[in-house]
Image (cartoon, rainbow, N blue to C red):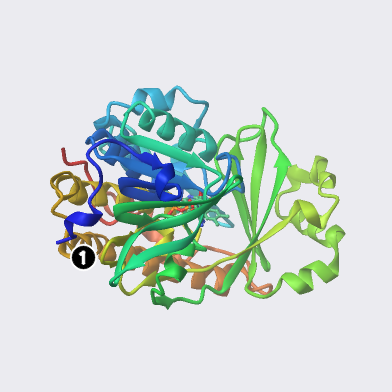
Amino acid sequence: MIPQSVRATATSVKADSEASHVEHTTCIVVGGGPGGAVLALLLARRGIPVTLLEAHTDFDRDFRGDTIHPSVMELFAELGLAEGLLQLRHTKLSSVTLPTPQGPLTLAPFRRLKTQYPYITMLPQADFLQFVVNEALRYPHFRLVMGARVEQLVEEEGMVRGVRYHLTDGWHEIRATLTVGADGRFSRVRKLAGMQAVKAAPPIDVLWFRLPRKASDSEDIMGRFGQGHILLLLNRQDTWQAAYVIPKGAYAQLHAAGLAALRHAIVELIPELADRVEQLQSWKQVSLLSVEADRLRKWYRPGLLLIGDAAHVMSPVGGVGINYAIQDATIAANVLAEPLLAGSLTVKHLRSIQRRREWPVRIVQAMQAFGQRQLAAIALDARKNFRGPGFLHVVSRIPFVRDIPGRFLAFGVWPVHLKG
Ligand SMILES: Cc1cc2nc3c(=O)[nH]c(=O)nc-3n(C[C@H](O)[C@H](O)[C@H](O)COP(=O)(O)OP(=O)(O)OC[C@H]3O[C@@H](n4cnc5c(N)ncnc54)[C@H](O)[C@@H]3O)c2cc1C
């Protein structure tokens, strides 16, 4: 059991100037991404004092996916927030379809799913996160600190007791019963805690850039594969977020070939972009995402839990990382709420969160690895035209079986629901 001395004060967070700005709460969440923001909301609504520390001063930063899966919509329905979420500006993706030389290959027809939300809601992540923290701010136990970059763990006798973070006005220390690292793929908390990861080696990287979207363009994801290139266009309302997949390490060669060659390759794949590709005028408009994937051997230490990408960096393939981070948050809140309220949290609770989440993560990462190998071997081989593995064309015609990939994408390996 966690000693009484580090349990939270019964009231909400308190800044104690006498104790050189040491604050106290019950749960610190480091990182206001989808995993951290949702966990903070779920704990706050159970009456648990929680402080969310986010390094950035707003939620509007680099693109990391705008997808809200049916399982997340169901969670928000359980919270009574689905209608509010759907009032934000969004679009709906009712299937995932790949263009192949034999015609469109529909991999995930969501409309046949048994759910009130048979689609992927495409909602700018910044709006989603703002919505979540606005809801959390309705609870008096919740505190949000933006611009708070966590740099150190407070450790005593082998236990994590809190963190030190940097704000524009200097250093702050906050202590809590539990610290949750939800600080994403470059997790500082993971490094500070010295946690060991099992690494995968995805064979692809992705170039990201934006191109204007026209009202007459398709609402769905657009994409073309073949002859050494893959280009996916994700609908971000006024713009297309373009993902140009390249073999790992090929960026230097591409850069040396010049921007004109990249523009040419884009138009070859999607001729409809010829009227706007000239807008790509500088490499500054193009960012390289090094695709990584890994998972921690152990997601916790006494007083510390990691969730989301901090515990398992997800490849963007399949676009499931947000869903998985929110499912981690949901399971964590289900397990943690009562012991945090009762002051009876033990390492056993933290272990049980890893036990429930590790297999779904391992399974989806294995599937992503398979997908990445297929992309690298088939679609990125300049000598071949992408046909889509033959069995996928067969699977897409078999009733019942054809719905499995959609169910898997929508809900993860098994559905996660809110308790309490
Ligand atoms: C380019 C790209 C595209 C992607 N596309 C998709 C997609 O379409 N769909 C999908 O589901 N997934 C996608 N993913 C994966 C997805 O973004 C992640 O799996 C998901 O965001 C993980 O959520 P998280 O809450 O664990 O971490 P993150 O979303 O990474 O959030 C971590 C938060 O912690 C904050 N932080 C970091 N360090 C500190 C610190 N020291 N102190 C305080 N705060 C800190 C960060 O500012 C950030 O807000 C994509 C990933 C990338 C890189």
Q: Indicate left or right for 341 with 140 as reference.
A: left
The residue positioned 58% from the left and 41% from the top of the image is: 57
The residue positioned 39% from the left and 66% from the top of the image is: 365
From this view, report whether residue 194 is shown above or below residue 166.
Answer: below
Q: Which x, y percent locates residue 89?
A: 52, 26
Q: Which x, y percent locates residue 99?
A: 56, 52
Residue 197, by quadrant, is: bottom left
Amino acid at pointer 1: Arg
Let me know if residue 118 appears in the view. Answer: no
Residue holding disc 1? 351
From this view, report whether residue 125 is shown above or below residue 265.
Answer: above
Question: Label 1: few (<14), some or many (≥20) within 10 Å?
Answer: some
Q: Which x, y percent locates residue 367?
A: 39, 66
Tell me the element at label 1: helix
Q: Which x, y percent locates residue 296?
A: 36, 71
Residue 309, by quadrant, is: bottom left
